[in-house]
Every structure is written in C-alpha cells, then in structure tokens.
Amino acid sequence: MIPQDSIVALATPSGAGAIAVIRISGQDAITIGNSVFKSIKNKELTTQKTHTLHLGHIMDDSKTLDEVLVSIFKGPNSYTGENTIEISCHGSTYIQQQIIQLLLRKGCRMADAGEFTLRAFLNGKLDLSQAEAVADLISSDNEASHQIAMQQMRGGFSNEIAKLREELLNFASLIELELDFAEEDVEFADRSQFHELLNRIEFVLKRLIDSFAVGNVIKNGIPVAIVGEPNVGKSTLLNALLNEERAIVSEIAGTTRDTIEDELVIGGIGFRFIDTAGIRETEDVVESIGIRKTFEKIEQAQVVVFLFDSSEFKVSGLKLKVELEKIKNQFPLKPLVIIGNKADKLKENETVNLKAEIPEILLISAKEKLGVEELKHQLLSFVNTGALRNNETIVTNTRHYDSLLKALDEIQKVKFGLETNLSSDLMSLDIKEALYQFGMITGQVTNDELLGNIFANFCIGK
C-alpha cells in the first residue's frame, strides 16, 4: 500500500508572490532534485546531510530557470518519512510551472490532494486523527479552532484514545485466554477491575462526545440570527458589529429583503451574523419571501438576537411582546438575546420602565455603537470555553464523533454483559467491536475508501 514513486506539488498558495516552495517526496526525490540543481559550490545533493540548505540554480540542460534554495530532508526524518526536498524559488507563476514541468519530465508525478500527509500516515509519522488535524490547522481562521487543531496534531486526542484502547485490549486478551481454557472453568480477567475500567472508559467517552457540541461550533462558527420588525436597526447593528458598512441602511422600512451574512471573531471564537428581513405583515411578494427566509435562518441559528426600537416601546410594546412570545414558543431551546436599540433617544424614566417590563433586556445604540461590546460579551457567554481554557481534548471531527458514539454503545453492551454474567465468548464480540471503533479514529483499522474520503478534502501540496 505504501507507494515508492516520487511526487511533486506546489506547497505554497498558487499565484504570484515573493517566493514559492515546490515539494518533492519519494525514494528518488533527492536524486531527481540533484539532476536539475547546480550548486554555486558544486555540491552534490545526494552526498549532503539531512536538514541542510543549499544555494544554486535550477537548470533545464544548459538553460537556467531560477536561482533557488534547496532544503534536504532524508527519510525517515522528514514530514512524510521519505526522502524529501523543498525548492524555494521566486514566486513567478511562469517559474513555478517551468520547474514543476521539468521535475515531471525527470520522473516525478503530480501529487494528489493530501498525498504528502497520506504518506506521513502510511509511514507511521502521524496517526489518522493527527493527519486530519493537519487539515483543520490549515483551515483554522480563529484562535480557538487553531488551538484545538494544534492540540490534536500534537497527539492529545490520539493519546487519550490509544490509552483506553490499550487497557481494553489487555482485558480482551485475558478473556480470549479464558475461552482457550473454557473446559477448566478458570477466570484470568479480574471482573471487578474490568468493571472499573469499563466505568472509566464510559466516563471518558461521554466527556469526549459532549465536547463535540463545543468543538463543532468552534470549528464551523456560531450562527447568530438578528431578527425584528423592519427599520429597528438590524442592518445598523450588523455594521456596528463588523465595524464596516456591510448592509444597506435606510429610513425606508423593508430595505433588507434577503439575508446578509458575515463573520466576526469574538474572544477567539468565530460568529456568523445573519441580518434578516424585518418581520411584519406585507403584501409585497419579494419582501414576503425574505420574511419566510428569516424564519428559516432562525431555525438554523444557534443564537437569536431579537432587536426592537426602544424609543417606540410605549406605542408598540404590546405588539412587540406578542412577536417575542411567538419566537420563544417556536424556538424554546435557542438562546435569545433581547435588545432595545436606539437607547440614546430614551429618557431616564423610560429606561427604568423598560428594564422593569423586560428585565433581561440589553439596551444599545447601534448607530452610536453604544453597548455593542456588552453584546459581544453576552454572545461569548453562550459558548462553554472552559474545556478550551483548561486545554482539555475537544472533538471537532464528525467522523470521530460517530466512532465515539458507536464505541460507547459497545462499551455499555459489555458492561451489561458483565453485570448479567453473559458468557465470555459473547462479551468478547462486543469488546472487539469497541476496539474496532477506537482503531477507526486513530487509523489502526482503515481501508482505501476511508482514506480516500479523508484526504480528498486536503489541499494539493500538503
């Protein structure tokens, strides 16, 4: 299964830049590199030490393509575990293409998406969960997702799973041994210790499964729907949060007829804000479609921000409460932030009365950007970042989550079998299935289809 050919790809983003890095990995990588490289000191790359840099030129016969810096990494002390060289050239797209085409003629082939990391996995440099963390690290766009990806890439999650698997495997071996001596009716596995182990594994699995709720929102961002009647300042609030003129603001009610989305990082956590069409009775066909989309976005959001014009509360307070109650009843499990906008227009007694009517209200002025920071803190409070602050393992990968659920189910079956004196041969089947699910996470059990699905999502050159 481990390929022997040499692969090449651009390791830096495509397009022009100051420099570009072209990576070659494979058994003959250094030999191929040496065939196109002329050192300024007449060095042969094949005789140089690993982890060294060499200045020279890439030559296509007698034609000089570029002055480059070549890095040498000899296997197994490289990212892929194979001989690897990296050519740092000038970032012209023409130069990149010329060098890659030359290397293809010299015996390389173009790397598939994620093939460098796939080879690292196949050569035992990374397990499967660490390899997947590489893709998460590349795509991380905020502090929290970066922190989780780094922790997983360093093996935090893998080590936790490997330890549980090893302990379970030891007991599985003892139970298998009992089956070999079934006629003598002996017990090699201490049932009380086994019960303690199963309780411990169950506790850890439940903690990891619960962490997915946090991990998933950190990885993908937390969708926040901004809803309310027309002309209460929803678009102004979105602009204030993003600190730019993202949405059209007008005195005309119903300006926003479709949803507008943008992202903002608050305290290292990504939030996706959705400015929706104002909720009201209307005969305008286009606006009606926008209002229907508003309720669809509320359904998809994890947090709902309900905005109203606090300066109009005396006139429209009753209608507002009806709308608010409707959203609460329709989406009872969603965190709801009630915001009174245009608070700069309120008199002191009006502010007091409004807080008495709606104790959980947050008063702001989106136009003057007053109270916006307080809103950000309130949104951040909905995310349980305790596990993140304590550097605990957080699951962000749906495939891992699925395997953990299946492993927990099997562990609970083993526990039930142990408590009801199920025969060792039947209990052994459930233990093997739990071990299989643990192995699926780290890659100790794998197949070509699984690897194809995982690495197809990588960028070429990684």
Image: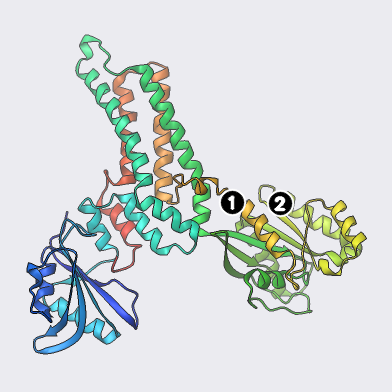
> Is label 2 in a helix, a strand or a loop?
helix
- Residue 345 located left or right of residue 4: right
Q: Residue at left 92%, top 60%?
A: 349
Q: Do the residues labelled 2 and 1 touch (CB within 8 Å)?
A: no
Of 84 and 181, nearer the camera is 84
Numbered badge on residue 330: 2
Residue 362 rendering spot, x and y as whole percentages: 76, 58
The quadrant of the picture occupied by the C terminus is bottom left
Q: In which quarter of the image is residue 191?
A: top left
Which residue, as the protein is rendered here, is positioned at the far top? 184
Residue 313 rendering spot, x and y as whole percentages: 87, 62
Q: Residue at left 55%, top 46%?
A: 386
> Is label 1 in a helix, a strand or a loop?
loop
Q: Which residue is disc 1 drawn over?
A: 383
- Residue 372 located left or right of residue 404: right
Q: Which amino acid does label 1 sit on?
A: Val
Q: Is residue 53 above or below residue 269?
A: below
Of 261 and 388, nearer the camera is 388
Q: Residue at left 10%, top 71%?
A: 45
Colour scheme employed for the rendering of this structure = rainbow
Residue 298 rendering spot, x and y as whole percentages: 65, 59
Q: How far apart are marks 2 and 1 (CA)?
A: 22 Å
Q: Is residue 95 above or below residue 134?
A: below
Q: Is residue 358 above or below residue 13?
A: above
